[in-house]
Amino acid sequence: MKSTIQTMNTSSSSSGDHKQPETDAQKTTTGYRNLTYQKWLHAMLLSFLTSIIILIPLHFFWKAVARATLSPQSLKMIKSGMQPTLFQAITTTTVWPPGYPTLLFFSHLIHIPFHWVNLSLLYATFFITFLFLRRFLTSVLALTAVSGLTLFSFHYYNYAQITSEALVTPLSLLTLLLLIEYKRHSSWLLLWSMSLIAAAAFISRYHILAWLLPVILLALLLDNRFSFGERSRRTGVFLGASLMPAGLYMLMNRIRTGYFTGMPRLGGYDVRPPLPSQGEAAYFANQVSFTDNIRLTFKTYFLDFFSQSTLATHHANRSPYRPSPLEIIAFGIFLTTIALTIHFFLQRRSEQRPSRADDGDHAVAILALAVFSYIIITIAMWTVGNNDPLYTRFLYPSYLPLTILFLSITTTVFRRSKSILYRTSFLLSIILILIVNAIKLRNIFSWF
């Protein structure tokens, strides 16, 4: 009897000292609550970043519009868009193709101001950039990167002008995105979609045709998933669909003016509009040499990405420029990041067996081909042609592909490499680029 009482007391004491084990139902409920909380935080962060992308451009864009002086090209585009008929809109000037004047004509027809058109194109550019970055990053990181573009970017300056770059930038980005998707799926729907978007880009700017067409043809003809006959057939479909609108317009130009592009494009200028000074007139009228175009190209990139005081305007490009210590440090760390990235891939290639390229490799290869082709073709065209000297407007369509290429490669290395040196260099380069551009925006536009 005594042992029984002791056993009961021991059992009672034991049940009081120890909690009952959690049941499976309780564990499921706790896990569900934690998961719901994480999803809620994730949704709130996505909503916050999306709000930045939507609201910030409304303020910055209209500030840029208020401060910008419309260029002669903008005034001619506005004149074309305000013509009473579409035929008059696309034939008012034969120097530029009719894609952008057509868009301006229809927006004027339904009483949408031209700057609102460009603002819509700016939002389209940000959205396509997000779709690009989403291939390499998570949704949160991709939205964070696009938010950085809205907060620390000078893109508003380019979109404040009524020029065709506002249209061809999202069109060329979308064409490259569709080309990358086509390399994954190879469907006829993607091929036709890419052909139609490319046609819209080609009919909007001849420079884009000269740049983007070779990139796409190379990607199609070297697609080893198909036989040579199938590759040729698909390439023929793309050429026919994408070049028909621009080809018909260029033929009409040839009949009207004697030139496919509406004017002689080689040699120096015959006639230039009045300019403030003889020095400026000489700057525009003289043909620029190959070495000068290389210098102007890299000076434009440096001023637009690393200068804390100026954009790569005509005035800045033809004036001496001395980088500040902060700009030199930012550029130096950026070059260090590039060098370490190249070293990582070379080391990885030597350590691993060659394997079939995956979708990410195809995307990076197409972006790299697009960026370097843009630089090479632009320098070549501006060397033999009679365009205005290189500055922001002519190189701007390559800025976002270049930014996406940099982020896609460096973030891949950041995830795979355990090097503290690389991770520090990458983070510092991003932070310093954001800082110099924030200072630039404050100095030029008083935005911060």
Image (cartoon, rainbow, N blue to C red):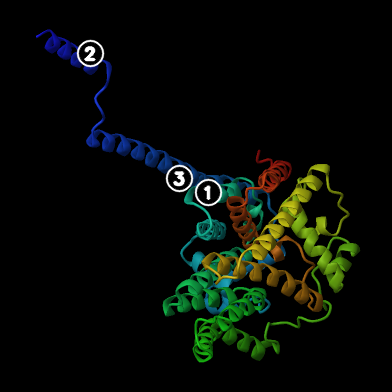
Q: Residue at x 86, y 63 (%)?
A: 280
Density class for disc 1 (Cα within 10 Å; few <14, some 14-19, many ≥20) is some
Label drawn at residue 46:
3
The image shows residue 67 at horizontal and vertical percentages of 68, 49
- Observer-nearest of 414 and 16: 16
Q: CA distance from mark 3 to mark 1?
A: 10 Å
Q: Residue at x 86, y 70 (%)?
A: 291
Judge whether 215 appears above or below 301 on screen: below
Residue furthest toward the left? 1
Q: Secondary structure at mark 2?
A: helix
- Left or right, 202 with respect to 291, comes to left
Going by the numbered disc 3, the residue's amino acid type is: Leu
Return the residue at label 2: 13
The image shows residue 419 at horizontal and vertical percentages of 66, 47
The image shows residue 267 at horizontal and vertical percentages of 83, 80
Tell me the quarter of the picture where residue 9 sits: top left
Which numbered mark, 2 or 1, is in the foreground of this view?
2
Density class for disc 3 (Cα within 10 Å; few <14, some 14-19, many ≥20) is some
- Observer-nearest of 155 and 17: 17
Judge whether 318 appears above or below 251 on screen: above
- Observer-nearest of 28 and 276: 28
Q: Residue at x 24, y 17 (%)?
A: 14
Going by the numbered disc 2, the residue's amino acid type is: Ser
Going by the numbered disc 1, the residue's amino acid type is: Leu
Return the residue at label 1: 141
Q: CA distance from mark 3 to mark 2?
A: 52 Å
Marks 3 and 2, the one that precedes in the sequence: 2
Q: Quadrant of the N terminus?
A: top left
Marks 3 and 1, the one that precedes in the sequence: 3
The answer to whether mark 3 and mark 1 are in CB contact below 8 A is no
The image shows residue 230 at horizontal and vertical percentages of 49, 88
Asked if residue 40 can be seen in this view, the reply is: yes
